[in-house]
């Protein structure tokens, strides 16, 4: 155990702590994991799932505020919060913290438990810059998936509290499940964005082809025309291209309708 009553989880025997503050959840380990797994099998948005998971953890671990940060680009972004009203307010703001700074402070590398005087620890202060609540205990669990840091799970308490080794391992297992869900959601988002990009490119190519044929211009001029229309109308180029394609389809269909005998 180091300063401020902190300790890092290791493969060795659990450190002796007062039984009254141990917070051992060995009896409910299976129940918590079953509930989390069941919830993750449901089709719910990622950020709602993260919030629901914080609620499930609260059923086994008593804490005053819980936070889930997701690693996005170069930042840790607050995506779920439960507990104090201040936590909910921070979550609404989508607070961003520098990922490199968090790793440098030790967050995201291994579980960290601070049993007392957490408010005085710089690693905790990094995550608690905007809150005026004085927190005494702090548990930070990395969200790791195949060696990649997907985010951080933080639990904070206003009273002194020891987290037992079994408790930390169980929450770490939940954190692993959360990390996998985060990566799946981000991959799905990337795939969707890629599909939309390909559809936009196809639409632009069709619009350029129509302009080339109708106006007898080359591909570069057709693209510049789309670009100018986009800037003048303050609309995405996809919208301009879609309007051209639709207009062309209506024009092509009009003669057929006119020549068809009326019933």
Image (cartoon, rainbow, N blue to C red):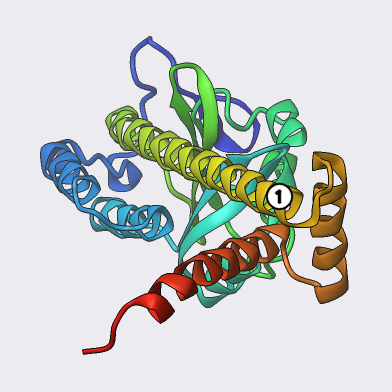
**Residue closest to the eye, 218 or 126:** 218
Q: Residue at x 38, y 10 (%)?
A: 11
Q: Residue at x 73, y 37 (%)?
A: 74
Q: Residue at x 44, y 34 (%)?
A: 183
**Residue closest to the eye, 14 or 150:** 150
Vertical side of 227 occupied by 26: above or below: above
Q: Is the C terminus in the top left, top right, bottom left or bottom right quadrant?
A: bottom left
* Residue 245 image position (x, y, % from top left): 58, 61
Q: Which residue is mark 1?
A: 213
Tell me the quarter of the picture where residue 240 sits: bottom right
24 with respect to 141 (left or right): left
- From where the camera sits, is residue 120 visible? no
Q: Residue at x 58, y 64 (%)?
A: 248
**Residue closest to the eye, 41 or 53:** 41
- From where the camera sits, is residue 129 visible? yes
Tell me the quarter of the picture where residue 246 sits: bottom right
Tell me the quarter of the picture where residue 168 sits: top left
* Residue 18 image position (x, y, % from top left): 34, 38
* Residue 69 image position (x, y, % from top left): 56, 47
Q: Indicate the secondary structure of the residue bearing disc 1.
A: helix
Q: How many marks on residues? A: 1
**Residue closest to the eye, 111 or 71:** 71
Q: Is the N terminus in the top left, top right, bottom left or bottom right quadrant?
A: top right
Vertical side of 258 occupied by 84: above or below: above
Q: Residues within 10 Å of mark 1 (few under 14, many from 20)?
A: few
Vertical side of 6 occupied by 52: above or below: below
250 with respect to 237 (left or right): left
């Amino acid at each position: 155990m180091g300063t401020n009553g902190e300790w890092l989880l290791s493969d060795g025997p659990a450190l002796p702590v007062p039984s009254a503050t141990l917070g051992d959840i060995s009896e409910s380990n299976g129940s918590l994991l079953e509930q989390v797994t069941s919830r993750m099998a449901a089709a719910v948005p990622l950020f709602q799932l993260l919030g629901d998971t914080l609620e499930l953890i609260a059923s086994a671990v008593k804490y005053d505020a819980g936070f889930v940060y997701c690693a996005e680009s170069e930042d840790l972004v607050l995506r779920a919060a439960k507990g104090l009203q201040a936590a909910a307010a921070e979550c609404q703001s989508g607070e961003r913290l520098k990922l490199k700074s968090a790793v440098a402070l030790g967050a995201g590398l291994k579980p960290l438990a601070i049993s007392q005087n957490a408010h005085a620890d710089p690693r905790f202060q990094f995550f608690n810059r905007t809150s005026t609540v004085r927190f005494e205990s702090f548990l930070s669990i990395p969200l790791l998936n195949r060696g990649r840091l997907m985010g951080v799970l933080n639990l904070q308490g206003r009273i002194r509290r020891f987290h037992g080794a079994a408790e930390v391992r169980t929450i770490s297992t939940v954190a692993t499940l959360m990390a996998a869900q985060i990566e799946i959601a981000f991959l799905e988002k990337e795939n969707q964005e890629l599909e939309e990009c390909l559809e936009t490119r196809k639409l632009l190519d069709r619009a350029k082809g129509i302009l080339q044929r109708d106006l007898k211009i080359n591909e570069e001029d057709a693209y510049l025309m789309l670009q100018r229309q986009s800037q003048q109308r303050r609309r995405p180029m996809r919208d301009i291209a879609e309007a051209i394609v639709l207009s062309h389809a209506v024009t092509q269909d009009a003669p057929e309708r006119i020549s068809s005998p009326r019933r």
